[in-house]
Every structure is written in structure tokens, then in C-alpha cells.
Amino acid sequence: MNINVFKNFKFDKRWIGGGLVVLAIVVPLLVRQFSGAGATPVDMATAGAQDVRPSILASGTLAYRTEVNLTAEVTARVANILVQEGDNAAKGQLLLRLDPETYNNVIAREEASVRQNRISIDRQRAVVALRKQQFERSQKLAASSLIDKNRLDEDRNQYIVAEADLRSSEEALRRATAVLGDAREQRAKTEIRAPIAGRIVSLPIKAGEVAIPSTASLAGAQLMKIADVSAITAEVKIDEADVAKITLGQRADVFSAAYPDTALASKVEKIALTPTVDGQGRSYKVTLAIDAPQDLLLRSGMSARALVYLGDGARRLAVPVEAVVTETPEKNVVKRYVWRSDGGVARKTAIVTGLSDDRWEAIESGVSEGAKIIIGPSKTLRRLKDGERVTQRENAGGRNGAASEDDSE
Amino acid sequence: MKDLLDIFLDPGAVWARQRDYARWWLPLVVLAVSTAAVTYLFFDKVDAGWFIEQQILNSGREVSEQQLAAIREAAPGGTFMIWSSTIGSIVMVVGVMMLFGAFFMLAGKFSKADLSFKQGLTLASWSQMPTLINTFLMMIGVMTMSSQTSLESLSLTSLNALFLHLPTDDPWYRFTTAFSVLVPWTIFLAALGWKLWAGATRWTTSIVIATLPHLIIYGAMAISAMTH
């Protein structure tokens, strides 16, 4: 019987048209329902705890922790230099000798002067003794009225004058002794000794040149520089607008010119209390103690830039900065939002932001950890509307997706 | 009226009947009215400020938030936009059909088939009837859409909606959104009509003639996409 049904069945070509109509209606509706077509493609990231590290950029130079510039205190020709640049020196070690000849001559002259004064004192003492005897004798004779009163007065006066002359000679001796001491001290200054234990990092003067006592950068003013090379610091200039945010102990990354890609971990060690005025602005010198690896050949005076991190280093709930939309509905009123993907539906969510750096914006309130946040494309973010269907973009999701996954873990 | 259904189910019979009384206005009215209805309902429902903003953003011009706000302020009122778009859609449908009709008339002259403009217009408008399916789907879309939906996203039979899902800033977005999978159907209907009316013995000529106007329109769009 069934066979008969099929035999009697005549194919009507109208079925083709009818089938096409049904297909043309049903298929697009099904595709729309199941492919997510119509949803706006977006990039998403997960809100999670991040290292939000706002920072201040500063530039400066590297410097050894202790550096001493040795200058001459007396003007003299350099007789001989006992060290070379790069040599290590112990504290008190003789480094350089200036020509002492001039000072030797002065000392000889002053020693002679001292001796001369001593002789003079001996002579004066003899005179005083003589005048004393003469005066005592005159007193006895005057008592017997053998000499008149005038003679007695004369002898007394001569005795007093002789004593005064003696005291004067004694003072002259003291003066000559002091001058001799001065001369010896001056000669001692022709020997330059190491004030600290360290390395000779700079030796601009040469034997035969004349060293002069000056702090100006004149030729011959600087003899050498000795530094404690066991520790190096960065001295950077922080703008006056930012210096209030810097506190002792804050972490920083220093990048030296020789190793521009190597971040040298460091800490704020010193903050100057007075500014340095240079050119157009005022800045404060901040010293950063660098914990430098031994294999890096860092030198004093190298240019360096530093990122001083202001936060406390704690991880906090944050979203990528590009996800935060700022609106000014009224004058002087700023509102911040992020777009959440709530089960594939975009939801505009007001947030309160905290610290931020060039990558993350900390969220004080408005979004909880794990929320799917729409971060781009920026063109789409500008035109998104509340309730719009969204889907993860396929071709560009990799970078952001991977980053957000890594960071959220 | 039977022909309105038969053009989908038994197009050969429709062409045979229409050859004699060339009722060109019936499908034209149906197409124009349905398109106008969808357009009216869409613009009645869509967020006018948002729609204009999207048009500007999609044009690829760089505009600031302030400029966008100013444009939203200066945008014409909803009623104006509804009616201008509705009337515009009718003019568009009628205009395109007349161009297609004129093309078939000219093609008739060249191939000595001797088709009048009225017959050309009949051929054009009846062969476009499958696009009613897209209009019907758009109507469903308009009923269920949110106020911020683009007109293009409602065209469910387009290449983009069915297969590609390209983003709006893709150079091929315009082409793939305009090109409907119903186009081959309309070409088949026009080719069948031509074959019967012009007495062509071979399908090739009919198909070439029916394809040519589409080729010009979509070819221009494809070149524009390639040179973007």
C-alpha cells in the first residue's frame, strides 16, 4: 500500500518555491538567534587585583655614595703624585706631595728668629740682674745719706726699664714661636693624604703643575677625587610640584644611560630641603640608594632617569585605563563609568576611581572583582548604549584577553 | 492577486499571464508600500539622535564629543526624519524599478525582443518580489528591536548577517550588507521572464541580461570596497 502511495505521488514544482520561501524566512531567523549576530564585537578584560603603581619620572646622574674632592690649601707646584687613577687608597695614605721648598725656607727663617729672641732674653736677664744690684746698693747708700735722692731715683728707674725690656723680649719669643708653628703647618699642607678609604676616581692634575687653593673650576684647583665605590646612588631632580609626594623609603626604578633597559631597584634615601634653581624651574635633589647588581659597570656621573613609585605597592582592584569613560554632564562635574558585560549585555556602571598609572586605574567602588569589563575598541566604547548586546571580538581579542587573563591571576 | 503568491511557487505561469496584461503596478505598490511601512516603523522607533550620530561615526570622519553633542542638538525632529525617510524609500523603490524597467526595454531593443517600457517595468517589479521576504524579516526585526539598532543590522538575508558578521568599520561591510542571498532568486525570476517573453532559446542570454543590472550595482560597491 505504501508503495502505491509513492507511485501515485506526483512531484509538484510548486513545492520548490514554497520550500525556498520557508527556508528564506526560517534560516536567517535561526542564524540570528544562534550566531550572536547583531551583538557588537568588543574587547573585554576581567576586573581584578593589580599592581597599580603611579610614578614620577625624574632625571639626574649616578654618583658614588661618598665622594671627596681634594683641593690644595696652599699654592705650590706639584712635586710628585704617589697614586694613579683607579688605585685604592687607605685612610690617611699619602697621595700627593707639593713642592715644600718655599715653606722650608720660611721655617728656617722663623727658627732663626726664635733663636735670636732667646739670646735677646738672656741678655736682658743679665741687664736686669745688674740693675737690681745697683738699685739695692743705692738704697743702702741713700739711707746713710751718702748719695742724694736723685741718684736713687735714677737707679730705680733703670731697674724698672730693664725688667720691661726683658718682658718685651719674652713676648717677642712667643710671637716668633707662633710664626714658626704657622710655617710648619703650611708645609704640612703640601702633603695631601686620603681623608677616607676609597678609590681614586679622578686625577686631573699632573706633576709639575701648580696647585692653587680655589673651589672654582680653574686649572689646578682640583687635585683629585676619591670615592667610596662600594655603594652607588642616583641624584635626580624632582620638580617642586611633585616633591611633596616623595617620602623616604619609596621604591624607584633607575635606568642608567649605559643600561637603558635594566631597571635598577632603588629606594629614596635623601630629599633635599632646599631647592636648586636651574633655568626656568625649581627642583629638589632626591638621592636614591641603588641596589646594583655586581655585574653592571656603573660609573659616577652617568646620566640616569628614575621612576619613583608613589603607591604603597599593595595590589588593588583595578581595570585597564582605556576602559574608564569620563563624562562631564555639568560644568565642573566629572563622572566616571565603565561598561560591564552582564551576560553579553552592556551595562554602564558608575565608578569611583583611586590611584592610577599608565596602565591601570584602581576602582574604589562600583565594580566588583571578576566583573567582565569592556575595554575597547575605543570607537565602540564611545557609541555603546546601555542594554546593547556585546560579544568578545575574535580577531583582536588575543592581546587584551591574554593580558587580562595573566593579570587577573 | 493569485500571481502575488504564484511568483514564488510557479513563476512560469505568472510570466505567461503577465505577458498579456502587464500588471506592473501591483508588485510595485506591494514593494513600495511594504518598504515604506518598514521604514516608517523603524524611524518611528529608533533613537533619532543616536541614529544620526552613528551615521557620522560610520562615515569615518573624526569628530569630537562636543561636535557630536552639537550635531545631536541640531538634528531634525523625529517626525521630519520619519516622513522624509518613508517618502525617500518609496521614491527609491519606484526609481530603481523604473531604471530596471528601462534597462529591460533597452535590452529588448538590442536583442530585437521588442519589449515595451511597461513590459520592462512589469518584468523588473515582479522579479523583485522575493525581496519581500527580507522586508518581512525586517518587519519582525523592527517589532523586536531596541531603540538603538541600525537599519543594516535588520537586513537578515544579507551576506554579512548570514555568514560573515563583519564589523561596521570593515571596508566590505557596506557591500556584504547590501548583497542579499535573495539576489540570485530575483535574477532567476528575471531570466525566466526574459526567456519566456523574448522567446530566447538559451538560458545564457537571459541570465546575462538579468544579471547585468545587479552586476553594475554590486560591482561598483565591490570596487569601492577594494579601493577603500
Image (cartoon, rainbow, N blue to C red):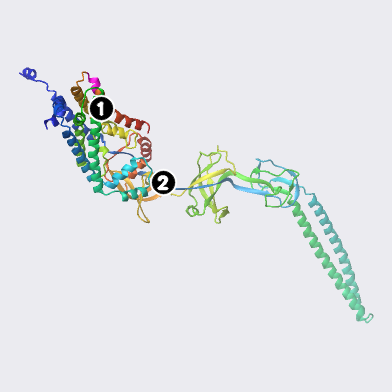
Q: Are marks 2 and 1 on the same chain?
A: no
Q: Which residue is mark 1?
A: B106
Q: Dot 1 surroundings within 10 Å: few (below 14), some, or many (20 or more)? A: some
Q: In the figure, residue A137 lies in which quadrant? A: bottom right
Residue type at numbered disc 1: Leu
Identify the subunit bearing mark 2.
A
Q: Which residue is mark 2?
A: A52
Identify the subunit bearing mark 1.
B
Give yes or no for residue B203 being in the magenta stretch. Answer: yes
Looking at the image, residue A151 lies above or below residue B57:
below
In this rendering, the label closer to the viewer, 2 or 1? 1
Looking at the image, residue A99 lies above or below residue B166:
below
Residue type at numbered disc 2: Val
In the picture, measured across the screen, residue A295 lies left or right of residue A95, that is left
Q: Residue furthest right?
A: A146
Percent across and percent down for residue A267 are 50, 47
Q: How many marks?
A: 2
Res B48 seen here: yes
Report the magenta residues as a range: B202-206
Which secondary structure dominates the residues rendered in magenta? helix
Label 2's element?
A: loop
Q: In the figure, residue A369 lies in which quadrant? A: top left
Q: Residue A142 or A206: which is nearer the viewer?
A: A206
